[in-house]
Amino acid sequence: MKPTDLSIHLDRFLRHHLAAQRNVSPNTITAYRDAFTLFLRFCRDSRGIALERLSLADIDVPLVEAFLEHLAGERRASISTQNHRLAVLHGFFRYVQSEVPERLLECQRIVGIPFRREPRKLVGYLSKDSLAAILAQPDLRIRQGRRDAVLLSVLYDTGARVQELIDVSTADVRLTHPAQVRLFGKGRKMRAVPLMDATVQLLRDHLAEYGLNRPERSDEPVFQNRQGDRLTRWGVRYILDKHVRAVRNANPGFTQRVTPHTLRHTKGMHLLQAGVSLEIIRDFLGHEQVTTTQVYARANLEMKRKALEKVSESSTFPDVPSWKRDGDLLDWLHAL
């Protein structure tokens, strides 16, 4: 059977455009693939067209909007998940419009479908006391505990995404002055992140204990599992959850949700509170735009607002005359 135009362009989009031209990470390609899997199944079930016969002409704005309603209703997907699926379709049809000019109008209509609005959430971050309690949990008397201590310290100190952390090899670590670690972020963009002295010593001891400070082991992962393989994202999540549970057991009042990304947000907030500019924080965390980094400024302002509310609730202020009842002041304002 002759392949359809949809199958041809979808294959080129995933294999060539994303991987070769845009150089996106394997995780991003997997996320795109999963979004298309859901969309193609919906197309098959809603239009009654076998996937081997589904073409670009079968996909229009009503179909995409129905897919989004399906995600919200039957699959109970959050607004952010719906927007992610829509962003995948936007990206694909932006690609198609330059490859198939005769489909330009319909592609632009699909790209013009707006994202769903969702309430703006403030970033979740840890207080310094909560962070210190988590970092103090690993048992330094055993090898695995020492590895966990180094991993959590580096995760916070660098503000790295989980994938960036587990991708770090020994060749990416520089412990001589100025100490730094190379991280490869989205789009395989590299950035060098400085390390604090305490983290440098932890890393130096860790590399020596695992024999990773030898030149011939420069390509091996810094953080390994018991089999000596590179840790997975779920492995890092398991390590963090284990030590967060220990903090909860010791302090039942600590109910905050903590993920590896929480440590990244915590680093961003601590940098902001230390007076570091948003532009530098953007480069430190590897954000594409400073508008992404502004979430920390909004969270910081919200924190200050709540603090002022607590102060005002416990303080008494004298009655202040209302300017609306001051005739002379009103006359002067109108004269302006």
Image (cartoon, rainbow, N blue to C red):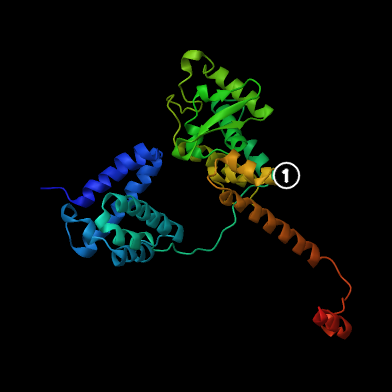
Residue 175 appears at what percent x and percent y? Answer: 61, 22
Total numbered circles? 1
Residue 214 appears at what percent x and percent y? Answer: 52, 14
The residue that mark 1 highlights is 275
- For label 1, the crowd category at 10 Å Cα-Cα, with few meaning under 14, some 14 to 19 and many 20 or more, is few
Q: Quadrant of residue 90?
A: bottom left
Determine if residue 38 is in view.
yes
Q: Which of 245 and 149 is in front in this view?
A: 149
Residue at image coords 59%, 35%: 158
The quarter of the rendered structure image containing the C terminus is bottom right
Q: What residue type is labelled 1?
A: Gly
Q: Which of 124 and 103 is in front in this view?
A: 103
Q: Which of 290 and 106 is in front in this view?
A: 106
Residue 114 appears at what percent x and percent y? Answer: 42, 63
User: Quick check: 238 above or below 77?
Assistant: above
Q: Nearer the viewer, residue 109 or 19?
A: 109
Residue 255 appears at what percent x and percent y? Answer: 60, 52
Residue furthest to the left: 1
Determine if residue 267 is in view.
no
Residue furthest to the front: 336
Q: Is residue 261 left or right of residue 44?
A: right
User: Quick check: 53 above or below 186?
Assistant: below
Q: Is residue 20 left or right of residue 137?
A: left
User: Quick check: 48 above or below 176?
Assistant: below
Q: Is residue 13 left or right of residue 332?
A: left
Residue at image coords 22%, 61%: 58
| Element class at badge 1 | loop
Q: Quadrant of residue 226?
A: top left
